[in-house]
Image (tube, helix red, strand yellow):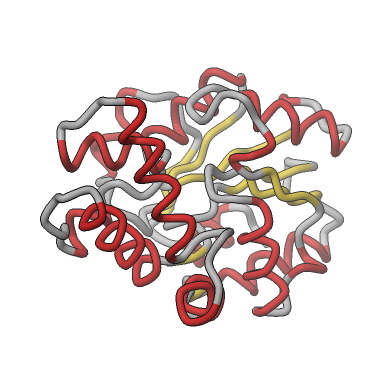
Amino acid sequence: MEYRGVLFDFDYTLADSTLAIAEGYRKGMEALGWPPPTEEQVRHTVGMTLEDGYALLTGDHDPERQRAFFSHFQHQVGIKATGAGRKLMIEGTRLFPGTEELLVALKEQGVQVAIVSTKPRQTIQRILVYRELERLVDLVVGGEDVSRAKPDPEGMEFALEKLGLDRTETLFCGDTVIDAATAQGGGLDFCAVLNGTTPATDFAHYPHVHIAQDLWGLKQWLEL
């Protein structure tokens, strides 16, 4: 294991919140007069900011309506939701096979682990607590912790500073070309994980040290 730190994206890298995200999109878009998107359409927005995902699905680039969609989403299943909607996001998020085993192996090797995501930090932390994984993650950087979302490397650089890591000794793992571009911009080695909707061929245009089929493959490649 040559890295002292590993940074992970969250959605479709370590976990799958599709059910809750799709519900938030449906309710948010219906509130703004749009037909509800299919789950498959929503899957292709995962990794984007909610505003960008809304614009992709509707073609509506009006900032005010994008902010309104963001607010509707957060009240339905996000950080401002209560009851069933919040439960769906926290308890309905499933971990990909191999997530816990990979994080345990990294902890045993003394490797520092952070999550850098556009998802709210509080939501990720609550999911980690619910899944009893919080002890395995040293830092969570959420969308509210940065002024510029990925692919800007701000969140990545924040994590490096907080953990005292050098970029030359840190790996970034993600499932989208947004993650690949983030690593490229921040000067980190990048490993793609094919848990999401992005095929391996899409990463050909970005620097990468490995493409893992899944988290078991990543663990094996890291020799853990």
Q: Which percent across, then down, holds residue 87?
A: 53, 79
User: Is 198 placed above or below 101 here?
Assistant: above
Q: Which percent across, then down, holds residue 85?
A: 46, 74
Residue 156 shown left or right of residue 51 in the figure: right
Residue 178 shown left or right of residue 91 in the figure: left
Residue 57 shown left or right of residue 17 in the figure: left
Q: Which percent across, then down, holds residue 166?
A: 80, 26
User: Is 21 placed above or below 3 here?
Assistant: below
Residue 2 shown left or right of residue 28 in the figure: right
Residue drawn at point x = 64 percent, y = 57 percent:
223
Q: Which percent across, then down, holds residue 38?
A: 15, 62
Residue drawn at point x = 64 percent, y = 66 percent:
102
Q: Nearer the viewer, residue 36 or 33?
A: 33
Q: Nearer the viewer, residue 18 or 76?
A: 76
Q: How many marks?
A: 0
In the rendered view of the protein, which quadrant contains the C terminus?
Answer: bottom right
Residue drawn at point x = 25 percent, y = 49 percent:
44
